[in-house]
Image: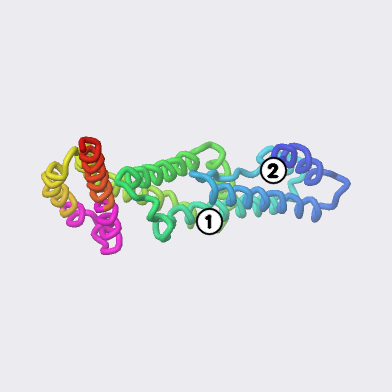
Amino acid sequence: MDIISRDVYLPLLSCNLLVSDIEKDRFLDLFHRLLNQTAATHTIQAESIVLPLPAFNILAHISQQEPERQQSILSILENTLTNWSKQIKQLLQEELKPSFYSREQSSIRDQVQLWTSRINKLNNLLVQLDSPFVQDVLKNLARNRSPYLASFMDIKIEITRAVTHAERNLSFVSTLSPWIFQINNSNNLNEILSYLPSLMHTLFLIWQHSHYYHQKDKFSQLLEVVSSEIVLRAKQIIANNISSKATNV
């Protein structure tokens, strides 16, 4: 449906000489707003953000054949830039939402995956921002001295900072993985107890050196995850011991 709209209806309605410029511009704007809304919906449902691109072939055709509609093209590009900003800011603010660090992250492996996924999303955005298509939009806006451009140019710096922040958090939480692995492979409770001093020292170092996990609520959540891992393995060992004794009776 998207292909039909872009390749059939859009050229037919936005470049039709029998239709007034006002109506053509109105449809052109409506199509791109719909495109942006579809991308925003996809962003909510998907694991990554895809920046929607304007219909370059149609805009280029209009620019060449109907130069009097140049302001309409500029408006489309500015709306595209505004939408990109909204999508990117939503991702940057995702970490601040309660749902980001939910109870579904019940293991250290989940914590590692959480930060790995965030790093991948942010890096994917940086790749898109460096793509020729996005750069073409930015160059067009710069050439027309669009006031929308200045604030957008700072976003890449924010994304890079967010990547560094997520990588740092990943490096801290990953230091717990070896100890949790040892605990999950323990065969008795005494073996679990032997790993606790090193595990607690690692947690102390995380609390001491990590800006993110030094926050009371974040560190409490991390302690809850670690505690759940230990309790779960202890329960499994006790259940296995009871089962073995029952079998031997």
Tag shown at residue 86: 1
Residue 144 x, y percent position in the rendering: 60, 51
**How many angstroms separate mark 1 from mark 2 (CA)?**
23 Å
Residue type (three-letter) at the residue carrying disc 1: Lys
Task: Indicate left or right for 3 with 138 as reference.
Answer: right
Q: Which residues are magenta?
A: 205-227
Task: Indicate left or right for 99 with 136 as reference.
Answer: left
Q: Earlier in the sequence, mark 1 or mark 2?
A: 2
Q: Dot 2, how many residues are within 10 Å of its Cα: few (below 14), some (14-19), or many (20+)?
A: many
Task: Indicate left or right for 128 with 187 as reference.
Answer: right
Q: Residue at 58% of width from left, 51% of height from top? A: 40
Q: Residue at 68% of width from left, 51% of height from top? A: 34
Residue 225 visible from this viewpoint = yes
Quadrant showing the N terminus: top right
Residue 173 visible from this viewpoint = no
Residue 10 x, y percent position in the rendering: 76, 43
Regarding mark 1 in the picture, which secondary structure is present there?
A: helix
Q: Nearer the viewer, residue 224 or 70?
A: 224
Q: Is residue 35 magenta?
A: no
Regarding mark 2 in the picture, which secondary structure is present there?
A: helix
Q: Residue furthest right?
A: 18
Closer to the eye: label 1 or 2: 1
Task: Indicate left or right for 130 with 32 as reference.
Answer: left
Residue 192 x, y percent position in the rendering: 16, 44
Dominant SS of magenta comes to: helix
Residue type (three-letter) at the residue carrying disc 2: Leu
Q: Which residue is mark 2?
A: 59
Q: Dot 1, how many residues are within 10 Å of its Cα: few (below 14), some (14-19), or many (20+)?
A: few
Q: Nearer the viewer, residue 43 or 193?
A: 193
